[in-house]
Image (cartoon, coloured by chain):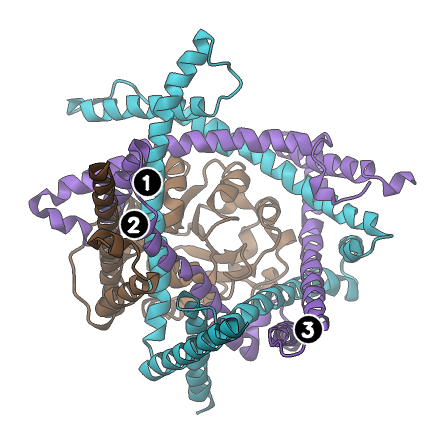
Amino acid sequence: MSFYRKKELPIAITALCAVLAIFATYFKVPEAKAASTTVQTWMLVIVNFAVTVGFVMVIRMHKKRIDKRKPGEKSWMFSAWLIAVLIVYALLGIYGVESTRTGAPTNDPSFNWVYNNAVVALDSAMYSLLAFFIASASFRAFKARTKEAGVLLISAAITMLYNAPAGSTIFGPLAPNFNSLGEWILNVPNMAGFRGITIGAAVGAISLGIRVLTGRERGYLGAGE
Amino acid sequence: MAADLATMIGIYVYALFALGAYSFTYKDNSFFRFAEHTYVALSISYNAAVSYGYIRFTAVQPILTGKDMTFIIPLLIGALFIFFFSKKYFWLYRFPISIVTGTGMGLAMSGTISAQFLDQVIATVRMPLYVVDKILGFQAMDTLNNWLILIMVLGTLAYFFFSIPPETALGAATSKLGLIGRWTMMIAFGSAFGNTVMTRMNLFIGVYKNLLRDYTSFLGLAALILIVATLEGQRAKKAEQKA
Amino acid sequence: MSFWKKLEAVDVRIIYLILWIAIGIPLLTPLYLPLSISPDTVLYYKAIEALPAGSVVVLGMDVSPAGYGGELGPQARATTYHLFTKPVKVIFLSFWETGAPLIQDVWKNQFVAGELKNKKYGEDYVNLHWIPGSETGMAAFAEDIWKTVAADYKGTKLADLPMMAKIKSINDITMLIVIETGTPGGPEYLRQWQARNRNLKMLIGSLGVSVPGNIPYVASGQYISLLRGGRGATEYQRILNIVTPTDVQSADAMTMSHVVVLVFLLVGNIGYLALKGQKGGKK
């Protein structure tokens, strides 16, 4: 296989870009800073092309479902609807960009209307489904089976009462003391636990970075040689 | 007039999609699948439109006006992403990915060392272990808290140390410290769960408030979806029994 | 079947219905439940109050529509209103493509719109819309704003925005207020902005779910303070005296939802212990 087709060249490019970024951060060399800033500005353009991969992939996947449909099945209609909406809204966005002569398609009233009434509704509703699942999990799954689970449960209950705007009022005159307890849990054990996790995660991120730079981690390059 | 009509239709569209998504909690049904597929389509096409807008006016416009021809380079490199779908030329796809990964990784690493490692370690080490206020004198609670934080942070870090054999003296000490870390994390995760409940409930409250803008759309569409979902469920049950 | 076994086997849709009803009641009629103010929110308020005249503040609207509709919208609107009552210059931007259009929604708020009448676009505030690239975009912006951002949300070049004349890099910014849903968010700004300008003051308005992870940064002084999700937003509105009946309803609904979840937790665990006792008794 030719050298430029193998993974070693992209790995070398990865390492070069990373070393340039790190060097420009820690050393005051104007030429390195200028080169790093240029690469970063170019990267902002390059990264926007990545959405085409997702766009084409979704169309291919749903077209396959339409092609493989069986008689009497209706699920293919949802795939057809998806592809139609995908193409129409993307074209509306492109029209919005060109007609308003700005980089923001939401400057076009039609595109913005769909964003405010459909995208916002769907995004909010899909994520808020978790509220129902948390409620049912609290009843069915969250049981103090062990001492650790019991401690977790008590900590959660105190935090919930602390977070609820009127949660501490059930304690009457002891409400300020309860609020102090809630603040203590947040600022002492919670802070300490998450600080330890943050430091550990930082060490993990740095070691992963070194693995990627030295070519030991190649998953991001995809399958094949 | 047109604006009022657009607003009214918007309220119904909002209610249709929100209630369609929520109908999953009752039964899997066509409204939910319609909402789900629309969500996927709109999310991707929105991102595509916004990305197009950025490329068009940040990279293409300077080339067309002759102000900055160097943007041809990132445009050509970015176009290589399309070779993801080619078996023969897949290797071309690796070039933009390597630039994106390398630059991002380099910037993240250089920032992580200071912001998330050094600053956190320094903050822990710099905590006074004997707190004295100039006016009020010795502060017992603050002193105790600082000692607790130090022990708990060390305990949490020790919990994740798997490379020291527990049979050795150091290993045994690390295990005991790790036990303190385990209990610390239980309290921390309990606090995290409590805060998660607040976020999820507020997400739902936000949508619920919008649904209550207009009772006709809310109740009318809710009734329609419940009826359709129930009928679909009954039909599916009959089909299962026949089979 | 015993009572506890029947309760354990209850249809999950009844739990969902209880949630709908419990949250619906305060949304229909506000209950005006009391509220205390936490020290974090007071510190957040004081940090903005203490901004000297002429300070340059960046408000990062790094939000998703879901986060904005829930907890971050009230935070963003209250923070924007507070900033507009001060003689400071505000740069709105977002590293989330879904957050950029919501900047204009913040301006439509009745209190913010009232203050906007005293402000001039381009001289007192600008909207630089969406900047792509996540953390790399943040780094590029910190190094050279004019090279990273071609124009504002309406396509106006930076050269035609008077307030941007002297703002070239992160060193020209006094304070950053991040209203964040997730990644990219606070930690990314810390890594790319505060690491470059150690004098950069940072405040953060976060979702409740992110609060535990953000507290270490508050404790270390990297963030001055934070708003704790929906609770923080409610408290901040009270301090600023910009509470509407809808906000009161949201706060009451928040309380009711937490009470419902706590009751479910309690009943679920009592049932578990009762069943465990019954099984132990039978043995």
Disc nearest the viewer among 2 and 3: 3
Q: Amino acid at mark 3?
A: Arg
Q: Mark 1 and mark 2 in contact? Answer it, CB < 8 Å.
A: no
C206 in relation to A11, above or below = below
Q: How much space separates mark 2 and mark 3, taking CA atoms?
A: 59 Å
Chain letter for mark 1: B
Crowding at mark 1 (Cα within 10 Å: few <14, some 14-19, many 20+): many
Crowding at mark 2 (Cα within 10 Å: few <14, some 14-19, many 20+): many
Which image quarter holds the N terminus of chain A? top right
Name the tint of chain C in the rendering: brown
Q: Which residue is mark 1?
A: B190
Q: Amino acid at mark 1?
A: Gly
Q: Residue at x 16, y 63 (%)?
A: C32
| Numbered label attached to residue B221 | none
Whether labels 1 and 2 belong to a single chain: the reply is no
Q: How much space separates mark 1 and mark 3, taking CA atoms?
A: 47 Å
Q: Residue at x 29, y 52 (%)?
A: A139
Tell which of C123 and A154 is nearer to you: A154
Q: Tell me residue C241's x, y (percent).
A: 23, 61
Q: Tell me residue C129's x, y (percent).
A: 54, 61
| Numbered label attached to residue C45 | 2
Q: Which chain is cyan?
A: B
Q: How much space separates mark 1 and mark 2, taking CA atoms?
A: 28 Å
Disc nearest the viewer among 1 and 2: 1
Secondary element under disc 1, as helix, strand or loop, is helix
Q: Which residue is mark 3?
A: A69
Disc nearest the viewer among 1 and 3: 3
Asked whether residue B209 appears in the rendered view, the answer is yes
Q: Residue at x 26, y 26 (%)?
A: B145
Q: Amino acid at mark 2?
A: Tyr
Name the tint of chain A in the rendering: purple
Tell which of A13 and A103 is nearer to you: A13
